[in-house]
Image (cartoon, coloured by chain):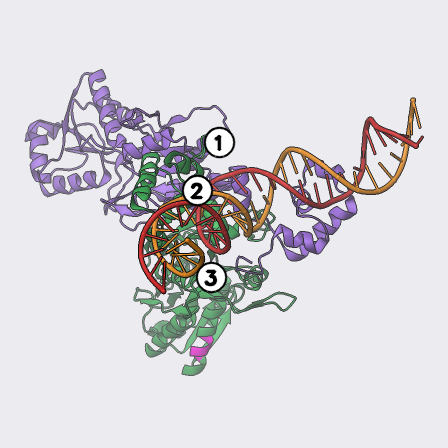
Chain colours: A green, B purple, C red, D orange
Amino acid sequence: MSAGRGRLTQNEIARMAGVSQTTVSLVLNNRCDAAWRIAPETRERVLRVIRETGYVADPLARRLLQQHNQILGVFTYESVFPSTSGNFYHPFLSGIEACAESIGCDLLLFTSAPVSGGSRRIFHDNNRIRLADGCVLLGREIPRDELARMVAEDMPFVSVGRRDDAYLPSGKGGPVPHVGADYAQATAALVHRAVDLGHRVMAYVGAGDGPESAIDRLAGFTAAVRETGVDGRHEPVGGRTRAELLDALCSARVTAVFCEELVEAVAMAEAARARGLSVPGDLSLLALGDPTEQAETDLDFTGFRIPREDMGWQAIEVLDDILHGRISDHQRLLPCELVEGETLDAPGPATGRN
Amino acid sequence: MSAGRGRLTQNEIARMAGVSQTTVSLVLNNRCDAAWRIAPETRERVLRVIRETGYVADPLARRLLQQHNQILGVFTYESVFPSTSGNFYHPFLSGIEACAESIGCDLLLFTSAPVSGGSRRIFHDNNRIRLADGCVLLGREIPRDELARMVAEDMPFVSVGRRDDAYLPSGKGGPVPHVGADYAQATAALVHRAVDLGHRVMAYVGAGDGPESAIDRLAGFTAAVRETGVDGRHEPVGGRTRAELLDALCSARVTAVFCEELVEAVAMAEAARARGLSVPGDLSLLALGDPTEQAETDLDFTGFRIPREDMGWQAIEVLDDILHGRISDHQRLLPCELVEGETLDAPGPATGRN
DNA sequence: CGGAGCCCGTAATTCGTATTACTGCCTCTG
DNA sequence: CAGAGGCAGTAATACGAATTACGGGCTCCG
């Protein structure tokens, strides 16, 4: 079939049915014109040959003319099915697949993109993005210039995860369509909850910088701290060991620690335990989102859950809207679900004992 | 870019560089002829325009002529990222992705295939398999007629999991290329181990029928039992409750039970516990492979591990071989790794006490 | 000085399908 | 009986890139 010579084409079908290629095409696509342009018997004859041979139109040739082919690209800046990222991307893909299925689209995974400088690049000299009608971008961090170029070149796409506007040096570019998680809101909600429980001194541990997801978390933390009037400090880990970091936090009388990453929270819990501090008795620990890396722990952290599956689904929805010129909200932030957990409690009397 | 009018084509590039489309093509593909056919300065001029515009050849048009486009299809008979199947397919995809990346191919997931009668079908009236150079088939059970048709139509493909030869009613068809797990060998090894420990009466619980994977397990069991001369019976669950099944096993003085599915093993362990039997003290339980469904248990079952990631990888390898006409082993069975676990022990003195 | 041979490139064709424009033929009507 | 109009279909073209075949201008040599 796809193999060389004996390839089944519309011409071949036409020859067998004794009609022209045009007729085959008309019958095949069941064009509204065909109903009254092609005699029922001719139509039937063509259909029979098609059935007998099992012919299907070459999607390539079709797409060449029609400019769309029901294929959506999925570009991941990290490996899609990595063992290292502990299936962090899995739920996104789950949602993407489910929605793609519901709208009858195939998915093209750009696994061929070469890795350069630690991450993949969309625009390399043999890229195939244009094979897809549009695409979905997945990854913690996506180079600004690539986003800008996508916008500038009118390539329909949606980012999974909020992205800032992106512009090329030339000034071309603009807002980036995305479906993100509302980290700021979720983090702020956790701060409020901590304040309600009586916490007055808290810290944000993590870079709070780089990818939008980190920036948003810190922003939510900062805003909520300001709003409630409590003491909130930002503690980038820097070169410090967890023990040193814990020292700093204790001497500042911090009672609640917001960890950007779950791995970070796990490490902090470990350090606290080593020092004889109980969690959450002596120290409350909050994990801002699902684990992006494998982390071993038996603690059920208080924090929030990223609506990953839903984000994947809606990303495809937005992409579909864009492709069909439907105006809808092309920048969405979905609420995160708070996780009760067992690592947040009222600050104990032991708080100031350091 | 992909959007309508302003589309960047070779013709456009040619116009800008003041050359012909042919020249652009030659330069772009760096044809060996081009080196001495195109003047360096012309070549440079074209390259500059290409760089400035960021032009890349439309893979569709390219494929239309060349008959291959570095895209491998992945067809799954169950949903690829299902929550129900407990990530059973994940490792396969991991291997597939990794190998595809290594040979520079993109992956096309046929998510658009409609579900009819509980499972998807490759050959529906809008299928797009031909977009791919070849494809990989994934699923516990794959309709024989679809396999036969793939063979008959010379569509390059590889099944993940052993498959019997497949023929169409017309007689067309043949052997199915596959990369499977050697369930027979692994199951037989477990039987031998049980026999070495002193077991003399054992049972195979499960259908032992239907998909090749079930057939192979039972076959391995049967062969090993015959070879060692012990008593081995096949117990399809049938309509029985676990308790009834356990009754039957006990009264037959079975000391080791080989469960086709891990869920089955979990259920048996549950039933044994309910009846006051200890595992493996009173009854040894073997799980023949990784869980295909979500199963909650704290038991570490003795059994074997399916080399899923490796199977995915090698499936792509074989596909690549086929596509390049390399003759290699197109039907491979990979060994499973035995898992020590804690549910197999020598038959206790309590054995006959029922 | 004529033509063989090279250099640098271009026109034309190809892939398989969709679409547009057209062409015979028949019938009906004024 | 000429011409309008419907019917049933076909020829021609387009899509974008690769390839084949060709061509115009120059040099060099007999």
Where residue C15 appears, x then y in whole percent?
Answer: 51, 38
**Front one among A31 and B101:** A31
Magenta highlight: main SS: helix
Q: At 48% across and 31% down in the image, what residue appears?
A: A4
Residue B129 included in the magenta stretch of the image: no
**Front one among C21 and B161:** C21
Where residue A257 appears, x then y in whole percent?
Answer: 42, 68
Splitting the image into 4 quarters, where does residue A344 fall?
A: bottom left
Image quadrant where one finds the C terminus of chain B: top left
Report if the CB atoms under discs 3 and 2 are less than 8 Å apart.
no
Q: Which mark is residue A264?
A: none
- Identify the secondary structure beneath mark 3: strand
Span highlighted in magenta in the image: A221-225
Amino acid type at image mark 1: Gly
3 or 1: mark nearer the eye? 1
Where residue B101 appears, x then y in whole percent?
Answer: 50, 42
Above/below status of B278 relative to A32: above
Residue corresponding to mark 2: A21
Real-space Cα separation, disc 1 to disc 2, in angstroms: 20 Å
Residue corresponding to mark 3: A159
Report the chain holding disc 1: A
Above/below status of A154 relative to A185: above
Amino acid type at image mark 2: Gln
